Image (tube, rainbow, N blue to C red):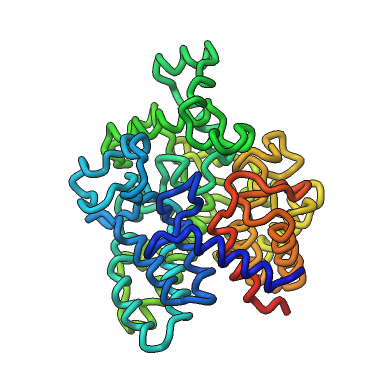
Amino acid sequence: MSAGRLEVGARDVLERNRRGSWTCPSTVLYPHQWLWDSCFIALGVARYDPLRAADEVRAVFRGQWTNGMLPHMTFDENVDDIGSRRIWKSKTHPLAPRGVDTSCITQPPLPAVAVYRVARALPAPNRQPFLAELFPKLLAYHQWLYDERDLHDSGLVTLIHPWECGLDTTPPWMQTLGRMPLPWWLRIAARLHLARVVRRIRNDTRYIPAAERPSDDDGLRMLVLATRAKQHGFQLERMPRLTSVLIEDLAFNSILVAANHSLELIARDLEVALPSALQRHFERTDDAFEQLWDEPSGQYYSRNAITQNLIKVPTIATFVPLWSGIPSRARAERLIELLRTPTCFWSRYPVPSVPIDAPEFQEAAYWKGPTWVNMNWMIEEGLRNYDHVELADQLRMQTLELVERAGCSEYFSPMTGEGYGADDFSWTAALVIDLLARDPA
């Protein structure tokens, strides 16, 4: 493996996808700015250009709402994408920023992690000013998450749409979405198989085979859900329980734990105290993961926020708590044993987003089976948290081999290593750079 060639290629991808102060995930398929994409991108860019990485993170906050919410998308004003803007119409919302168009929902809360790690890479004179600049904005975001999405102070944040979880079409969400009561027109469309007509106006399937993208039915249901959320101002407390899909998402809440810890470290570096109420929220989140653990299967699962039942569909999300440092040593060992199972998660090119022996597994279908570099990156760090250094090194090398063989694809076959989705995908490139920079010993 030529580490130098890999890094040069990855940097070239990030340069081509650069849009001034921020970087789009893909020039063709994803021309706008996405929240957790920019955070992952900043982590890789910080390895060779920390000042640019700092600007990448700053650009995330240009879309912040006055209530603290960070949107999952901030639109590029130079891209003609009227259809996507019409879904949200953010400027009709009194709390949205006036200067940019955004979505009206959030995404995995990685900004505090990105801010803290980028700050560590900055030249010494730039660190404190950077942290001081973004600390109040991070506080506002975390406060919004708990005030608006943890209505009962359970410690677990509730999501109102699968686009918020990052793993958009992951089976737990799609199965729950499949039971959502449909409007009359969509029931007719489903009965007559008219959803396929939508493919003619979809942007993604113009460039990517339909088998690699969300199905037409999934896509229509997600649009219906977004429309319903819009009718209620995207406010959880107003969402009707009968027609909504509300989930305490495992991956999102695991990332929140890591973000909370990063925010604590930022406060320590600035020598300021976090608000005591927010600190109590952090502690409740740590404790709440007991409720997401299923002892018989030895896994964590997302939970239906309406029924309070675990959604016992196995996915890669069960390993994200390793990255956050949540599990006890005994639970961590059970998770790692599950990870190492060749017939389940340790495929030829690990780690599949759905275990390969699960009925939901689809090798090429978006978040229903493929391997993603960002998830491998988190799991690799999680393994090191629990001193499984050799396995972490193995996963690191297999991930780099995957990209060396197939390029900076959006996602990959866990069986053959073939690349799927968008080419020249930014977080793949950025995280390859970060993995290359780590000492594997």
Q: State the residue in front, 179 or 36.
A: 36
Q: Residue at image x 58%, y 36%?
A: 213
265 or 406, which is in the foreground? 406
Judge whether 230 appears above or below 131 on screen.
above
Q: Residue at x 77, y 46 (%)?
A: 415
Residue name at image x 48 percent, y 76 percent? 49
Q: Is residue 152 visible?
A: no
Relative horizontal placement of residue 301, taking residue 57 as reference (left or right): right
Give how far across and how far down residue 130 sits, in percent.
Answer: 34, 77
Q: Position of residue 15 (x, y in %)?
A: 50, 64
Q: Nearer the viewer, residue 211 or 182?
A: 211
Q: Quadrant of residue 362?
A: top right
Q: Residue furthest bottom?
A: 124
Is the N terminus in the top left, top right, bottom left or bottom right quadrant? bottom right
Does residue 205 appear left or right of residue 245 in this picture? right
- Examine the rendered structure and indicate whether residue 249 appears above or below residue 120: above
Residue at position x 54%, y 46% in the image: 167
Residue 364 visible to the viewer: yes
